[in-house]
Amino acid sequence: MSRSAKHTFFSDDGFQFGVECTLGAVLHGAADVGEVLTTIARIPDGKPEAWVAEWTATADRVADEARTAESSGHLRSAAARWLRASNYYARATDSADTSDVFTGLWEHHRDAWDRFAELTTRIGETAIEPITVPYEDTTLPGYVFGTPGSGPRRTLIFVNGSDGSVVSAWTDCAVDALRRGWTVVTVDGPGQNAALVRQGIPFRPDWEAVLTPLIDHVGTRPDVDPDRIAVLGLSQGGFWVPRAIAHEHRVAAAVVDPGVVDVSTAMTSNLPGFLRKVLDAGDRAKFDKEMGWGLRFSRGGLATMLAWRMRPYGVTSPFEFFTAARAYRLTAEEMAAIRCPVLITDPEHEQFWPGQSARLAEALTCPVTRMSFTAAEGADRHCEPLAPALRGERIFDWLDETVPDGGSV
C-alpha cells in the first residue's frame, strides 16, 4: 500500500504529494485551505501545464493582495500574503517544463519570500537576516532566523532537500524552533535554490564541504552558541546530514527526516530491469536512446519530471543523471564515524526511500532514536506532510532533551 486511507485529490502521485505538502503548510501560515482547494479544483489530473498555470494564477492574485496591504500600511497582512504567494509560486515550479519557466517562477517565489522576510523583521517579532557564507572560491546565500536582541542560543542548522523551496526552512523548522528558543540557520547549498538558479552550482554528495564552512561562519555570531549546534536534514537532506556529520564533529545532535542511505534507489527502482542492466554496463548511448523512446510515449509528464530532477545534478543526459545519483550513498565507514546522537524519522508509506530509515538506524553506532509516524496518526508519507504539528512536537521534544536549554517548555 503506497498511499494511506485519506482523501485522494489526484491519481497522479506527484500532484497528490504536492497538495499534501501545501495543505501541511497551512499550520505555519504558508498556505490557506481555501486557496489550495480552489486552485486544485481547476487542475485536471495529470496535466502539468495546468498545474503550472493555476498555481501561478493563485500566487499572482495573493501577491497582488500583498502589495495592496503593504501600500495601505497593513504590514502583518502583507507579510502573511507574501509568504503564501512565495509558497504557491514554488509549487508551480514542480511541473515547469523548461528552464526559463522554472527560473521565472523561482525568481517570483524568492522575491515574495524576501518581501515576507523584510516585513517580518520590520514588525519586530522575528528577525530574518540574509547572510552569505564562504564556500570554496565563492559564497552561498542563506538566512539566520532569531529573536531580536537575544544572546547566544542553541542553534539549529536546517538542510533542505533536493527541491525544497526556502519556504520549507520556515514551515519545517524555523517556526517551531523559534518558539523553543533556538537560533535557526539555513543556506542554499550546491544544487539548491539560489546556488543552482543564480550561481549554476550543482549538487555534490560530500556535504561536509558545505556544513564545515557554515559552522565556521556562524559559530562566531553573538546569537549562536557554538557548543550547542544541531542539524536537521529534510528529504534528501536525510542523506547529506549523515554524510556531513561523519566528517564534521562539532555537531551536538542531528535529525534526519527520513534516513537515507542510498539516494539513487529513488531513481533506479523505477527503471525496467533491462535498462538497469544497460546502466550497469555503462552503455551511455544505448541507455539514453532507450530512455528517449520511453519518454516519447510516456504519459503524465514523465519527461518534465525527469528534466526537473536532472537540473540540480548539472547533467544533460539520463545516463549521466542515474550514474551521478549513485555517488550519493553512505558507506559503512561513514556511518560508523558518526558520533553525535541522531534522530531518524520513519514514516509509514515512505514513497521515495522505503526501508532506509531502518537501515540507517541499524548501521549507526552512535546513540540513535528511530521515530515512527503512522497512517493511523495521519502522519505517514515522505516527511509527514499532513502532520506538521505532530512532527514538530516530537522532533523538538527530542531536541530539547538532547540539547537542553534551561528555558525550554
Image: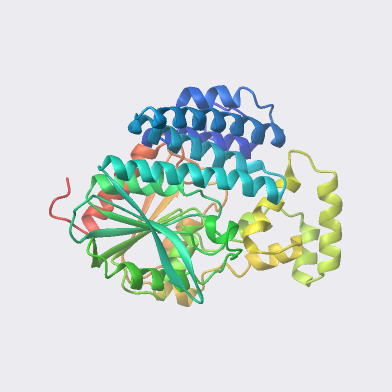
Q: Residue at x 50, y 39 (%)?
A: 87
Give coordinates of residue 274: x percent, y percent: 81, 59
Q: Residue at x 40, y 28 (%)?
A: 69
Q: Nearer the viewer, residue 4 or 405?
A: 405
**Which quadrant would residue 394 be assigned to in this image?**
top left
Colour style of the rendered protein structure: rainbow
Q: Nearer the viewer, residue 322 or 94?
A: 94
Q: Is residue 236 above or below residue 76?
A: below
In the picture as drawn, the residue positioned furthest to the left comes out as: 406
Q: Is residue 187 visible?
A: yes
For the C terminus, the image quarter is top left
- Left or right? Give the position of 167 relative to 123: right
Give coordinates of residue 157: x percent, y percent: 36, 59
Q: Residue at x 70, y 36 (%)?
A: 48
Q: Nearer the viewer, residue 308 or 135?
A: 135
Q: Is residue 24 visible?
A: no
Give coordinates of residue 256: x percent, y percent: 41, 57
For the N terminus, the image quarter is top right
Q: Total marks drawn?
A: 0
- Left or right? Give the position of 207 relative to 302: left
Q: Is residue 297 above or below residue 56?
A: below
Give coordinates of residue 205: x percent, y percent: 54, 69
In the picture as drawn, the residue positioned furthest to the front comes out as: 71
Q: Is residue 182 above or below residue 80?
A: below
